[in-house]
């Protein structure tokens, strides 16, 4: 696989991300176009070397495709719950994919303890700000992404764990924007973290 094949979809995501950030700043409808292109970039990056030849790779590709669906849906503010479900399914696919490579218990146990403390802290910070209709879905999503993070640690792959951790942080930015303090700064931080995470995970598909 040549470096040019890899760099083209990464470049697409990077350029589309820049356009997306500008569109978000201007509150332009073009953000749908830029977000779609940026997210297509990480799927393209994943399949650039051919379809995955392993179960973990296939599951990560499924997670990327579900994330793409979530990205497009979340452009529409009234479809938040649908987007949340799509991303929850993506995280489940990632978690199963990570675990299918094996589970390093000496690593999983301390990371799970840290993830539990983080979960409780985020729950206390966030949940009371969420309207009652969304509290259970948001709580479920928090649990799923925590499991995904622990599963990534258990894979013993620094690349996978880095991607998962960046995804986790990007979700905190989304939560802050949606429920705590809406503002462009959340997207200026969260979107680059998110697309970096997806590109990193895409690099592990094959």
Image (spheres, grey):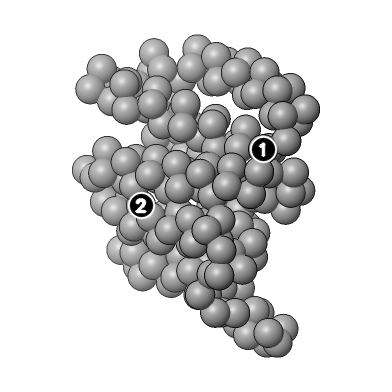
Q: Residue at x 32, y 41 (%)?
A: 85
Numbered badge on residue 70: 2
Q: Secondary structure at mark 1?
A: loop
Q: Which callout, 1 or 2, points to the residue nearer the camera?
A: 1
Q: Which mark is residue 35?
A: none
- x and y percentages locating residue 172 in the rendered image: 53, 34
Quadrant position of the C terminus in the picture: bottom right
Q: Classify mark 1: residues with Cα within 10 Å, few (<14), some (14-19) or many (20+).
A: some
Q: In the image shown, does 54 or 112 lie closer to the viewer?
A: 54
Q: Quadrant of residue 112?
A: top right
Nearer-the-camera pick, 102 or 157: 102
Q: Is residue 75 left or right of residue 48?
A: left
Q: Is residue 165 visible?
A: no
Residue 109 drawn at (x, y percent)? 70, 23
Q: Residue at x 25, y 17 (%)?
A: 132
Question: Relative to 205, is 87 above or below?
Answer: above
Left or right, residue 118 beside residue 106: left
Q: How far apart are the two marked residues, 1 and 2, measured between alpha carbons?
A: 28 Å
Q: Which mark is residue 103?
A: 1
Q: Position of residue 5 (x, y in %)?
A: 63, 85
Locate the N terminus and report the quarter of the image it occupies.
bottom right
Query: Is 155 rendered above or below residue 144?
Result: below
Circle 2 SS class: helix
Q: Please, is residue 106 above or below residue 65 in the view?
A: above
**Residue 10 makes an appearance in the image:** yes
Q: Sort mark 2 into few (<14), some (14-19) or many (20+) by Cα contacts within 10 Å.
A: many
Q: Earlier in the sequence, mark 1 or mark 2?
A: 2
The picture places residue 116, in percent across and down from the top left corner, at 60, 18
């Amino acid at each position: 696989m040549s470096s040019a094949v890899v760099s083209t979809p990464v470049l697409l995501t990077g350029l589309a991300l820049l356009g997306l950030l500008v569109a978000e700043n201007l509150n332009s409808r073009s953000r749908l176009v830029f977000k779609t292109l940026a997210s297509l970039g990480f799927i393209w990056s994943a399949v650039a070397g051919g379809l995955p030849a392993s179960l973990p790779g296939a599951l990560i590709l499924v997670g990327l495709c579900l994330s793409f669906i979530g990205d497009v849906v979340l452009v529409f503010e009234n479809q938040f719950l649908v987007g949340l479900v799509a991303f929850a399914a993506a995280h489940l696919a990632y978690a199963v994919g990570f675990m299918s490579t094996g589970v390093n218990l000496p690593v999983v146990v301390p990371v799970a303890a840290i993830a539990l403390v983080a979960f409780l802290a985020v729950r206390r910070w966030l949940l009371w700000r969420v309207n009652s209709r969304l509290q259970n879905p948001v709580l479920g999503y928090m649990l799923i992404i925590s499991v995904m993070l622990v599963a990534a640690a258990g894979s013993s792959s620094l690349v996978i764990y880095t991607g998962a951790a960046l995804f986790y942080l990007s979700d905190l930015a989304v939560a802050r924007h949606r429920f705590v303090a809406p503002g462009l700064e959340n997207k200026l931080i969260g979107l680059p973290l998110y697309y970096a995470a997806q590109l990193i995970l895409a690099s592990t598909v094959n």
